[in-house]
Image (cartoon, rainbow, N blue to C red):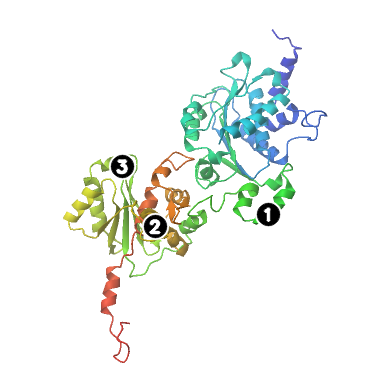
Amino acid sequence: MPTATDPNVELSQFVAKYKFDPLGYVRVAFPWGQEGTPLEKHLGPCPCQVRLLTILGDEMRKRNFDGHNPVMPIRIACCSGHGIGKSAFFGMVTDWIRVCWPYSQGSATANTAKQLSTKTWANIRKWHKLSICSHWFEATSERIYKPEDAEAWFLATQSSSKDNAEAFAGQHAQNSISYYINDECSGIGDPIFDVQEGGLTDGCPIQFAFGNPTKQTGKFARIMQGREAGWITIRIDSRECPFSNKTLIQQWVDNYGEDSDFVKVRVRGLPPSVSYDQFISSELVHAAQSLTRVASYVDTDALIAGCDLSWGGEDQCCVRFRRGMDARTIPPIYVRGEQTRDPNTMVQVLAKVLATSYNGRQVEMLFIDSAGICGPVVRRLREMGHQNIIEVNFGAHSSDEKYKLMRSYMIGQVKEALMAGLALDSSADLADDMTALEYSMTSKTEILITPKEQLRKPEPEGLGRSTDDLDALALTFAMPVVSKAANDQRYQRKPRSRVTSGAWS
């Protein structure tokens, strides 16, 4: 039994004072400024690390976890440039949790196995060795744990592969902290975050999501865009941190420009205007969804509808409308995929669409995805007298030599319309559909847009779903439609005087 003078007892009493003060712990737990140590030239954590530790401490004190009654999770996301010391921060903060919160349980992951082993975990182990309490724990290439409580008091590495998502399940620390370290989050898919949710239900849970903002889509992007509730978001410019190479950074700024994507991502901690090979930029989409963008059309513009059909599975059927530059005013229509196993469901929906007057105008042409249940749906609609329907094969060759396939062509027309002033509704799914698109060039220099099958894959490889909204909108650009009003005006015009060439005015 330890005695009152046992050094470990005194040390336990000393560190217990810092349960709600991670910054205070970090300042006393490591050999800052001590000669012969890796920290001999450092007197304490850098300003960026101080900022993060202060925020964490403030949140801990707000919750004042009593060891019994669960509190709301602390979720901190940090988007940064290179060289801010985030891996070192993970080393410091995991040591604080492990030492000050007995029976804490943690998982650490990163976008790739190499990043996890050589950067994230390597720094966590480095700071563990520097800690005044390192002798309390055992450290391996995959775990740091309390030997006598190895299954209940630990931090372990986990792969972020989508096939490994379930490995994050079952982590609970009812009387302590259950925590997750997510590094380089732009490359970590939604399934990992989804499973981590299960470890946030009891105790005092903490979730960290850090990384460079290399992508416009995915969980990390949505968090930093303020579209995920409950997260504290922080952006850090590399130039704020003493560790970064200021000369090299200035060279980047001089070479690429302050507002270039290179500097935004690597220095400023901002997302790129256009991700690598991104076909439609976020700026185009945000401008189109802004309420300052006027949804405009002229009287002779036809009202067009596009319908992307599902195959009766998880994908939903979507109908979108467009008149001129207005793809906003008439709300889209959604039908769950499982409801469309009976084609009559979509027959009824589309018959109503074709019979309805929208702001005094009926749909003059419906373009419909020719795949799946299209055949029986269109056949029945035509039997009902609706002849203003055109089937479109997404996989057919485009008549425009600039594009490889019909789907690529239609999406290309969407992009051109966005540049010309197309107004969109505020749908987050539609925005994600557009900004997730990448393109490649064929040997004949034809543009080929990311296939739907690729986009259905889980993040980060795809969106984890079908791009129903985008495809429905794209169908409204399948081909030009001349409205009845335009034809009426054309034939009602009077001929000019015979002195002229006889052309119509």
Q: CA distance from mark 3 to mark 1?
A: 49 Å
Q: Is residue 500 left or right of residue 168?
A: left
Q: Position of residue 89 (x, y in %)?
A: 67, 34
User: Which comes sooner in the sequence, label 1 or label 2?
Assistant: 1
Nearer the observer, 32 or 370: 370
Secondary structure beneath disc 1? helix
The residue that label 1 is drawn on is 253
Q: Nearer the viewer, residue 489 or 356?
A: 489
- View extreme (left): residue: 383
- For residue 337, which numbered disc appears in the image? 3
Is residue 363 something one can see in this rendering? no
Residue 403 on image: x %, y %: 41, 57
Of labels 2 and 3, the one closer to you: 2
Quarter the C terminus occupies:
bottom left
Q: Residues within 10 Å of mark 3 (few under 14, many from 20)?
A: some
Q: Earlier in the sequence, mark 3 or mark 1?
A: 1
Q: Which residue is mark 2?
A: 409
Q: Can you name the residue that lies furthest to the top here? A: 1
Q: Can you give x and y, in whole percent of width and height, for residue 271 in the image?
A: 57, 49
Most distant residue in the bottom direction: 499
Task: State the image quarter where residue 328 is shown.
Answer: bottom left
Left or right, 234 with respect to 135, comes to left
Q: Residue at x 62, y 56 (%)?
A: 259
Front in this rendered view, residue 284 or 97: 284
Q: Which mark is residue 369?
A: none
At 30% from the left and 90% from the top, the residue drawn is 497
Give the vertical position of 470 relative to 134 (above or below).
below
Residue type at mark 3 is Gly
Q: Are marks 3 and 1 in contact (CB under 8 Å)?
A: no
